[in-house]
Amino acid sequence: MSWKGKRKDNDVRVSDDETETHAPAKKIAKPADSFSDESDDIVVCNISKNRRVSVRNWNGKIWIDIREFYVKDGKTLPGKKGISLSVDQWNTLRDHAGDIEKALSDPS
């Protein structure tokens, strides 16, 4: 066995006689202002200077987005740190808010 490990059965390799090459897919840049303050997101509240809670419609679904933002070239953009909850996940979290409050108040 080589140092690379076992080859998986679904690993597909192109043989030498198949010389077709495909160009990598081109990436299309999203406009920077699609995430700026002018977007269609409903900002529910600002948690802190760079953190906010918003409700957005993305791909036909409603998401509750809790995210950090940063400013670049005068535009406010979303950062990588954050979470988007579906409505079902949000309802589950909301239903357990009392349990969270209780856990925060317990000194142990």
Image: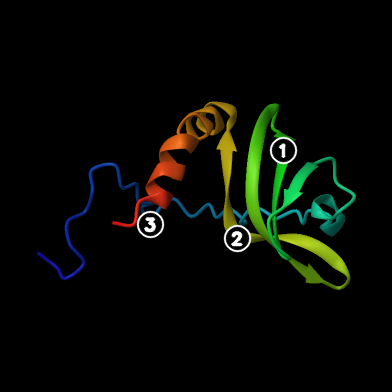
Real-space CA distance between mark 1 and mark 2, rounded to the nearest whole angstrom: 17 Å
**Which amino acid is tagged 2?**
Lys
Q: Is residue 101 shown above or below 50?
A: above
For image coordinates 73% across by 65% down, the residue present is: 49
Mark identifier at residue 68: none
Counting every numbered tag in the picture gives 3
Real-space CA distance between mark 2 and mark 3, rounded to the nearest whole angstrom: 41 Å
Q: Secondary structure at mark 1?
A: strand
First in sequence, mark 1 or 3: give its number: 3
Q: Where is mark 2, residue-wise?
A: 80
Q: Where is mark 1, residue-wise?
A: 55
Q: Secondary structure at mark 2?
A: strand
- Nearest to viewer (mark 2 / mark 3): 2
First in sequence, mark 2 or 3: give its number: 3
Q: In the visual, does 16 lie left or right of 32?
A: left
Q: Residues at badges 1 and 3 in contact (C-beta under 8 Å)?
A: no
Q: In the visual, does 100 lie left or right of 44?
A: left
Nearer-the-camera pick, 44 or 14: 44
Q: Whole-percent x and y of residue 13?
A: 35, 51
**Which amino acid is tagged 3?**
Asp
Q: Where is mark 3, residue-wise?
A: 16
Q: Whole-percent x and y of residue 66?
A: 63, 49
Q: Whole-percent x and y of residue 11?
A: 31, 47
- Nearest to viewer (mark 1 / mark 2): 1
**Which amino acid is tagged 1?**
Val
Nearer-the-camera pick, 86 or 35: 86
Nearer-the-camera pick, 90 or 32: 90
For image coordinates 49% across by 37% down, the residue present is: 97
Badge 1: residue crowd in 10 Å (few <14, some 14–19, many ≥20): some
Q: Is residue 16 shown above or below 54?
A: below
Q: Whole-percent x and y of residue 5?
A: 17, 62
